[in-house]
Amino acid sequence: MGFYLTNKQLADECLKMAGHGSPVELVRKGITYYRDRWGYVLGGQGETYTKELAEKWAATRHRGTDRDYYVNECAQWYTPPRRVVDCSGMIVQAFRTYYPGYPDRTANGFASQFVGGGRMDTLPEIAGVAVHKDGHIGIYIGGGLVVESRGRNYGVVISELKTQKWTKWGCIAEVQYIPVEKPDAIPVFRRNLKYKMKGDDVAAVQAKLVAFGFDIGKYGPKKDGVDGVFGKLTDTAVRKFQAQKALKVDGIVGVKTWAALMG
């Protein structure tokens, strides 16, 4: 029996492990941490991490100082108990959502079976292609962003391409890639937005406001108000949205307002 996912299914499953849609916990140096993200433990493939499991893994897997790694260094994933994956385990788990018998594979094992690919300067704007460097792998989601199980201090996060020294990209053999002209990049919170500011993140907020039914004018290429400029109508709509969601009504799109809009 073959194991096949579409590139969208792969990207969506990895985003679920990043906790995307839950309140943002932290945005720092090009990396977004969601509160409900899965943790990282070497060898993890979706197990719920508890101290009991850590002790078991330490007893069966430890070599020298590895016991401290499982029991103490990865203890942040005990409370609340998180499911854990390592970098290749994230992809394996995405497949196992649909095919429980999907076999284990390392990051370099996936890369050795890439169908096509190339240098990072030729990376296509297609969500679901893999990015790789020796011993590590992630899934590109468009817009210069990657979902990766980054390490024990991070868990599964959304990161900008520049935060890792990726060396190549490739198509995973069992993924059916359906290219689209403009894949939907996942909007990531980076800064507080307010009146008179401009940018793509402002446009992302405006698009969500329009989707929620707010009138923000007839600006922009589609005459729907989405022009990337935080004007008076956008300010008014943000304040109304904040009032509806019982948030602080200040017209500033901070972490909580962003999460409510994007979630």
Image (tube, rainbow, N blue to C red):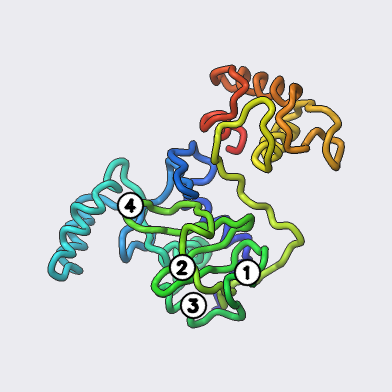
Q: Which of disc 1 and disc 4 is earlier in sequence?
A: 1
Which image quarter is the N terminus in?
Answer: bottom right
Q: Earlier in the sequence, mark 1 or mark 2?
A: 1
Residue under circle 4?
153
Local secondary structure at mark 2 = strand
Horizontal side of 35 relative to 2 (left or right) equals left
Residue 253 in the figure: left or right of residue 220: left
* Residue for badge 1: 123
Q: How many marks are shown on the rendered structure?
A: 4
Report, in whole angstroms, how far the alpha carbon at label 4 lies from the one at label 2. Answer: 17 Å
Residue neighbourhood size for the residue with mark 2, other residues' Cα within 10 Å, grouped as few (<14), some (14–19), many (≥20): many
- In what element is the residue under mark 4? loop
Disc 3 residue crowd, few under 14, some 14–19, many 20+, Cα 10 Å: many
- Give the CA separation, mark 1 to mark 2: 14 Å
Q: Amino acid at mark 3?
A: Ala
Q: Is residue 102 above or below residue 70?
A: below
Q: Amino acid at mark 4?
A: Asn
**Distance from the alpha carbon under mark 4 to that under mark 1:** 28 Å
**Residue beneath disc 2:** 137
Horizontal and vertical percent position of residue 146: 53, 58
**Which amino acid type is marked by label 1?**
Leu
Query: Which amino acid is tagged 2?
Result: Ile
Q: Nearer the viewer, residue 81 or 219?
A: 219
Image position, residue 51 (x, y; %) = 21, 50
In the depicted structure, whether residue 49 falls above or below residue 172: above
The label nearer to you, 1 versus 2, is 1
Residue 115 versus residue 238 in the image, above or below = below
N-term mark: 1 or 3: 3
Please name the residue that numbered disc 3 is placed on.
111
SS of the residue under disc 1: loop
